[in-house]
Image (cartoon, helix red, strand yellow):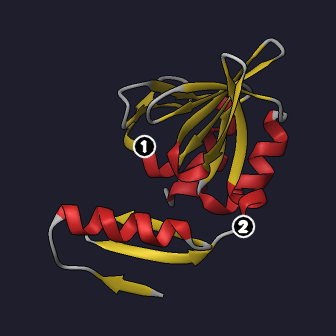
Amino acid sequence: MKILYKGSKEELQKLEQQLRKGEFEFVLSGEDFELRKSSFLLDTVIGEKVGNYIPIHHSNILYIESYGHDIVCHTIDEEYTIREKLYEIEELFESYGFIRVHKSFIVNRHHIISIEPIINRKFKLKLSSGDIIEVSRKYYSEFKRFIGMRG
């Protein structure tokens, strides 16, 4: 279901808060927003920061990074350690627009603001946070298909 909302940002924020209290996911895309039936187990991961555990909704995640045995979830506001494996998160959030772009990175396509081709069949992704993530050669072809590029 899609609904076009015309009104002030303050009213939109109030509406969003009311809808989030229910079992709906509120997705804003430009001028449009979409309501979807929400499932806590499928829509979130649990992040840890300074001994506190926080549910993190997929829409707030920019990218997820693995280094060593640590998995770090980079959100709009914070960074959290999470317990899931990278391949588990890839499977869990695939239908929400997440894609593996490197052995150590999964990105949320909704936060990609530019894609720059670089030497040796690679891309450089600039995210809404300003972070730069490289698409490795191994994931280059799959990423091109994902974004609809030919050739």
* View extreme (left): residue: 8
Question: Eyeballing the image, is 58 above or below 100?
Answer: below
Residue that badge 1 annotates: 112
**x then y, percent, for residue 149:** 49, 56
**x then y, percent, for residue 102:** 67, 30
Residue placed most toward the observer, 113 or 75: 75
- Badge 1 or badge 2: first in the primary sequence: 2
Kind of residue at disc 2 = Ser
Is residue 46 left or right of 151 when viewed as pictured? right
Q: Secondary structure at mark 1?
A: strand
Question: Eyeballing the image, is 94 above or below 31?
Answer: above
Q: Is residue 15 visible?
A: yes
**x then y, percent, for residue 69:** 84, 15
Residue placed most toward the observer, 2 or 148: 2
Is residue 150 left or right of 23 when viewed as pictured? left
Q: Which mark is residue 85?
A: none
Q: Secondary structure at mark 2?
A: loop
Mark 1 and mark 2: span between their CA atoms? 25 Å
**x then y, percent, for residue 136:** 63, 28
Q: Name the image quarter holding residue 70.
A: top right
Q: Residue at x 47, y 72 (%)?
A: 19
Kind of residue at disc 1 = Ile
Q: Is residue 30 visible?
A: no
Residue placed most toward the observer, 142 or 90: 90
* View extreme (top): residue: 68
Q: Residue at x 42, y 63 (%)?
A: 17
Residue that badge 2 annotates: 39
Is residue 51 left or right of 111 when viewed as pictured? right
Q: Name the image quarter holding residue 107.
A: top right
Q: Residue at x 15, y 68 (%)?
A: 8
Q: Nearer the viewer, mark 1 or mark 2?
A: 2
Q: Residue at x 75, y 46 (%)?
A: 90
